[in-house]
């Protein structure tokens, strides 16, 4: 059974070098190549991968440099898509923090690169998804019916007195914070043509859904339609999402909104093999084809 991987990462050389030149630890940016990606896909029966950037974002100093780098990364993704037909798609990146440049890059990707899939981090220098300043971006994404794949970033502000790797828990908290912020601010309901993909089994959203729904009403907030918002989202199963998160997801949405993901190359092969085994054991056979490929085909019109 061929799979479609909605949560796979690539690290173009220009992106990786920019991070290293600006002091990002080399351990945080693994080596990647199209050959290694294809080898991984072939080993695990993956027909097609949507490649996106992980954290951190690549804006460090000059916004013009950031915009130029975003364009080069997106054109590299388009090149891979053309070079390996039927194997790679890509999520275009945006040159935050300049909102108008982001809008221009959305237009360029949609018109010239024929791509309506975009990758966004949960926050950019402390500006979280759902913030009013991002409205022009949502309007443009909504206009083209974009698919937006979220990925967590380090939370801002971070408590530097707590020495914990962000992957242990902060990424889950930041995903939950960003999506909750979008629910509170009405982003998901207002821009309903955008299909949001939430990583890592929805992080903590499924655990907090009842609390969000009940407490929002108890403290006098307008009806945020929490259940409706969470049902409309898509969720990838990358990372450690078995078995508890899977069960909670089925109480939050239905199997048509669950997507397969690997988190390669940030998840090494040996660890991924264990994740896949857990996935195989947990997901009933009648839903595997749907989750492994059919839902993604319907979402990205593959």
Image: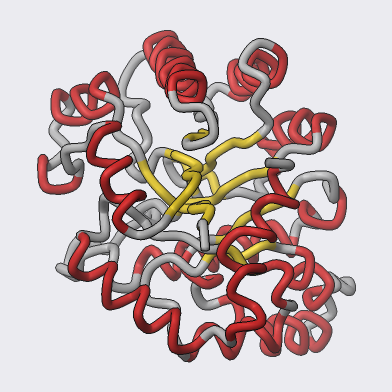
Is residue 207 visible to us here? no
The image shows residue 100, relative to residue 159, as above or below, that is above
Between residues 291 and 75, which one lies in front from this camera angle? 291
**Which residue shows up at 35% across the image and 49% down it?**
41
**Residue 216 screen position, x and y as percent:** 77, 80
**Which residue shows up at 59% across the image and 36% down it?**
118
Between residues 230 and 82, which one lies in front from this camera angle? 82
138 lies left or right of 277? right
**Residue 146 screen position, x and y as percent:** 73, 38
163 lies left or right of 273? left
Q: What colour scheme has been applied to the protein in the rendered image?
A: secondary structure
Between residues 49 and 103, which one lies in front from this camera angle? 49
Report the quarter where the C terminus lies: top right
127 lies left or right of 15? right
Q: Where, by quadrant of the figure, is residue 296 drawn?
A: bottom right
Between residues 213 and 233, which one lies in front from this camera angle? 233
Is residue 185 visible to us here? yes
Q: Number of numbered discs present?
A: 0
The image shows residue 184, relative to residue 113, as above or below, that is below
**Which residue shows up at 70% across the image and 88% down it?**
251
Q: Where, by quadrant of the figure, is residue 36 drawn?
A: top left
112 lies left or right of 16? right
**Residue 123 screen position, x and y as percent:** 49, 47
**Residue 254 screen position, x and y as percent:** 74, 78
Q: Where, by quadrant of the figure, is residue 213 drawn?
A: bottom right
**Which residue shows up at 67% across the image and 20% down it?**
114
């Amino acid at each position: 059974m061929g799979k479609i991987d909605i949560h796979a990462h690539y690290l173009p050389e220009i992106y990786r070098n920019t991070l290293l030149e600006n002091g990002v630890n080399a351990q945080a940016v693994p080596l990647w190549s199209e050959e290694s990606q294809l080898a991984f896909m072939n080993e695990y029966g993956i027909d097609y991968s949507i490649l996106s950037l992980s954290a951190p974002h690549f804006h460090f100093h000059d916004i013009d440099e950031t915009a130029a780098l975003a364009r080069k990364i997106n054109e590299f993704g388009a090149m891979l898509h053309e070079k390996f037909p039927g194997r790679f798609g890509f999520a275009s990146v945006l040159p935050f923090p300049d909102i108008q440049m982001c809008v221009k890059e959305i237009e360029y990707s949609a018109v010239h690169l024929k791509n309506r899939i975009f990758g966004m981090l949960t926050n950019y220098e402390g500006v979280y998804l759902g913030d009013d300043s991002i409205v022009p971006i949502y309007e443009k994404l909504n206009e083209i019916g974009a698919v937006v794949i979220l990925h967590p970033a380090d939370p801002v502000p971070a408590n530097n007195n707590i020495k914990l790797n962000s992957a242990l828990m902060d990424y889950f908290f930041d995903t939950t914070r960003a999506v909750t912020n979008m629910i509170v601010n009405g982003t998901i309901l207002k821009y309903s043509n955008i299909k949001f993909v939430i990583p890592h089994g929805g992080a903590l959203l499924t655990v907090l859904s009842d609390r969000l729904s009940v407490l929002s009403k108890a403290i006098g907030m307008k009806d945020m339609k929490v259940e409706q918002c969470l049902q409309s989202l898509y969720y990838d199963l990358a990372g450690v999402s078995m078995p508890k998160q899977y069960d909670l997801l089925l109480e939050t949405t239905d199997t048509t909104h669950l997507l397969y993901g690997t988190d390669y190359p940030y998840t090494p092969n040996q660890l991924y093999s264990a994740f896949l085994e857990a996935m195989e054991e947990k997901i009933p056979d009648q839903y595997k084809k749907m989750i492994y490929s059919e839902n993604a085909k319907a979402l990205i019109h593959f």
